[in-house]
Structures are given as structure tokens and as C-alpha cells.
Amino acid sequence: MASPCGDKSEYARLLLETDCLRDDLVRTIIDWLDLPLGSSGFDAGCGVGSNTLLLAEAVGRRGHVTGLDLADDLLRIAGERARQSGHEDRIDFKQGDINNPPFDPDTFDWVWSADCVGPGTGDPLAQVEALARLVRPGGSVSILAWSSQNLLPGYPMLEARLDATPAGIAPFKQNMKPEKHLFQASRWLARAGLQDITAKTFVGDIRAPLDEVRRNALGLLFDMRWGGAEGDADEQDWDLYRRLADPASPEFIGDRPGYYAFFTYTVFHGWRSAHAISDH
């Protein structure tokens, strides 16, 4: 899913207020990964720390998670959330670039990166190679990202046309090389020297009736997904979309009885050989 451009404080608000739609799905993914209790992990591109907190819960009181992000304003929010959660003693946040993470090789038991590695953020293979170097022999790397959605049930043509706009397919670009597409991530992991690579897609549900928090979150999710498409969408399509996607509209689709939508996250996961010898 594309990240909104512009005001970082607005982006932080969007992330925080849509957490309620993603948290259950993220917990399911973390459970599937079966991270060892007491392990040390790295959340690359942690943003406001939403996933970092869930990862810290998963590894228990003797575990530790380090989050890294370029945006200091997002990190300030993440740090405050860690303090409020009671997990502050087992979470660290650092400012830095995932393309050149400021850690020694073989530092972590596992690496996690959600909605960060891949198109729009640099060379995905180089990013995965940088992350793989941080994992101890026997450790793992997990790359995950929003991969599809059906948020406008009953309007498949409208949704398809919105998806076909430059904003709708972001962060991909028309002339982008196929090897930079998210679904090439198994190749990135293999070329980074990881083994036993798996890929799995998980589904998150949104269904009526929606309480006020989830109702507002759905409206924000629409903005995150297609909010920049106005200049490229057909005028009639855009008018219909706004009537369906605006919680203030009497036609807001989330208010319809029986409303059901879904979105997916796809996880690519690989292991560093337990017998690997660091080059450093």
C-alpha cells in the first residue's frame, strides 16, 4: 500500500487511526512466524511502532526488539507508545536508513520489515542483503507488504479503474523493472543467501456493523489507498468513489448492511544457514 506524501504528522495520524483494521492480521502473521521467546529482533522501517509493540509482546519479557526509521517525528511517537505500553525496557528505537542500517553483522535473531522494503524505497535486493547481514546464523528475515484488496464490494469495475491509476498502483511505476515488484521477493531473499524460503498471503477482514472507530478508520484507509487518484480518474468515477468512500456521505459504503471487504498482506520469509560464516 502506498504511503501518503507530504506532512509526516498527517501520515502518523493515518497510521495510528487505521491500526485497528490491521492489528489482528499482524498478530496472525506474527503467530505464524513463531518467533522464539526471549529472542532479539529488528523492525526495519518501524514508523510509529505499531508492529514493534506487537513483536515485543510475541518475544516475551526476556526478548528485545529494535525499531529503525528515518523519520524522527514518527520515532518520537513510537517511543511514547512504548512507554505507555509498559514494554519500554525491551524496545529501542533508533533513527537510520534501512539501506545502511547502523548495526554490526550478526546482531539479531530475526528481522522483520513491513510496508518498507521494495518499490519506491530503493533497490530491494540491496535492502534485503543489508538486512540479511544483520541476522545471526540460524536466524530469519521476513518481508511483508500490503498486496491486494477488495474494499468496494459491488463496484468491481470502479475499484479496478482506481487501481489502474498511477496513485492506485503506487509505489510501482509504469516503467519499473519486473524484478522490483513485491512478488519477486523470494528471489531477493535467495540472492541474499537465505534458504528454506516460503511465501504466504494472509487476509484481513472488515465487516459491518462498524463501530465509530473502525468506521473512521475505513474512511482513512480509502484515502491511503486511492486518495491521490483524483487527477487521473474519470470524473464520474471519482464522484462515485468519493460518495462511497467518505464517512460523512449518506452513501458511505461502510454503512451498508452486510458490508464485507478484505485486504491481504503477503509475507516472504527465509532463513540464514545455521552454519553460515559472516564475511565481516
Image (spheres, grey):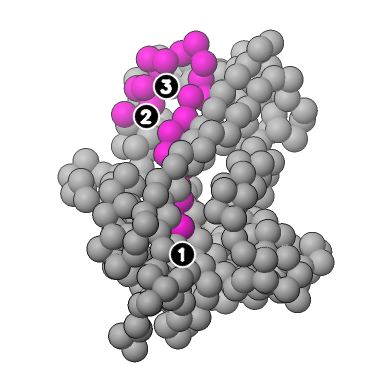
Q: Which residue is mark 3?
A: 159
**Is residue 76 something that shows in the picture?**
no
Q: Residue at x 48, y 41 (%)?
A: 265
Residue 228 picture quarter: top left
For label 2, the SS is: helix
The magenta-colored residue range is 142-164
Q: Count all numbered tags in the image, as a single digit.
A: 3
What is the x, y in percent for residue 262? 54, 28
Q: Contact (CB < 8 A) between labels 2 and 1? A: no
What is the x, y in percent for residue 162? 38, 26
Q: Contact (CB < 8 A) between labels 2 and 3? A: yes
Q: What amino acid type is highlighted by mark number 1?
A: Ser
Q: Which residue is mark 2?
A: 163
Q: Residue at x 77, y 28 (%)?
A: 211
Q: What amino acid type is highlighted by mark number 2?
A: Asp
How much space separates mark 2 and mark 1, taking CA atoms?
33 Å
